[in-house]
Amino acid sequence: ACREAISALRSLSPRQMRGAFVLDLLARCYFEMAEYSKAVEIWQECCERDRCLRTVSLELYSTALWHLRDAAKLGALAQRAMALDRERSQTWCVVGNCYSLRDDHEQAIRAFNRAIQLGPSCAYAHTLLAHEYVASEKFDSAVQMYERAIAIDGRHYNAWWGLGNLYHRRQDHNNARYHLEKALSINGGNPVVRTSLGMVYEALKQPGRALQLFASAESSPHCRTMATFHKGSLLSALGRHEAAVEVLRRTAAMAPKEASVHFQLGRALVACGDRKQALLHFTRSMELCSGKDAKDYQLIVAAQLELTRSSVLDAAVAVGAAAAGTAAASAGPKCCT
């Protein structure tokens, strides 16, 4: 639907396209498809057209900047919004996103609560508050906020996704599937929803559907790395190691500093018999791990030790076989007497 909406908006006259209202709609379409860079580019132009920011979806614009980790632009937007209107719900959504990007969850929660106080019918403010509760591991409060958002707007797919993601974290996969399928039925073009739903189907032992969802999310710049990583890991788990290596190598090129990517690639290479390359990726994964006491670090060490022992054992067997062959050759016919 978003693609069709973009085509319709692009067909307008140049004069109409320069209007802040049309630009905001266009940016929203790209936002809903998780194409945040393009959305931000259009919203920046929109802010130039509308100096008072009245036609700008500030809550979405600031969320796009949050996804892009652009603290400088997000901070500048928060200052501008506060200077223009402190009594507007969207202003406090921008402030909340600004604090959230700094990992100051307490201040972010206060800001989002203020946004809800000023705009009780703003479903997105409830969802942003719920996201922050999840980040603070206050899961019961998060569920409550997501459900309130859905009560305000039943087609608010962000809250359906939030609930599904939360149930997935709790390993309640059937509940997660229900909520994520609902989100997908509302916004079928969103790659974040597709990737999350793929992870749930993977957990439910339905790899065919999971691979289909990961493949459909690979085209998104925002989700490509995550989707290819899960696709490669699943291919490896299914025993399709050569295909997994190909996919995970693409993932490693996109995310060279992700320890988990190198670890999964190392495991797939071991299964393909390429132990030298596997050892290189296990070593790289160890270097990227946060600390020696981390669970992931210990897991990588164990895999590396197992690979090293296996290589030594194979070498010993090969040397023993060669020695036995030499002894047999030197003994000649005497070995049969």
Image (tube, rainbow, N blue to C red):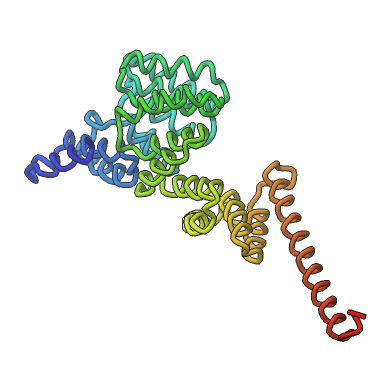
> Looking at the picture, does residue 257 appear above or below residue 6?
below
**Residue 108's x, y, as percent?**
48, 26
Q: Residue at x 48, y 18 (%)?
A: 143
Q: Does 64 sit left or right of 275 as displayed?
A: left
> Looking at the picture, does residue 165 appear above or below residue 192?
above
Work out which quarter of the rendered image holds the N terminus and state it: top left
Q: Does 200 sit left or right of 92 as displayed?
A: right
Do we see residue 304 in this rendering? yes
Work out which quarter of the rendered image holds the C terminus and state it: bottom right
**Residue 137's x, y, as percent?**
57, 24
Do we see residue 111 in this rendering? no
Please state which of residues 32 and 273 is positioned toward the viewer in this rendering.
273
Please state which of residues 289 and 225 is positioned toward the viewer in this rendering.
225
**Residue 327's x, y, as percent?**
87, 81
Q: Residue at x 26, y 35 (%)?
A: 28
Q: Does 82 sit left or right of 136 as displayed?
A: left
Please state which of residues 80 and 92 is positioned toward the viewer in this rendering.
92
**Residue 267's x, y, as percent?**
62, 54
Please state which of residues 298 and 56 is positioned toward the viewer in this rendering.
298
Q: Residue at x 19, y 39 (%)?
A: 23
- In the image, farthest residue toward the front: 337
> Where, by quadrant of the figure, is residue 223 drawn?
top left
Q: Residue at x 70, y 46 (%)?
A: 299
The total number of labels drawn is: 0
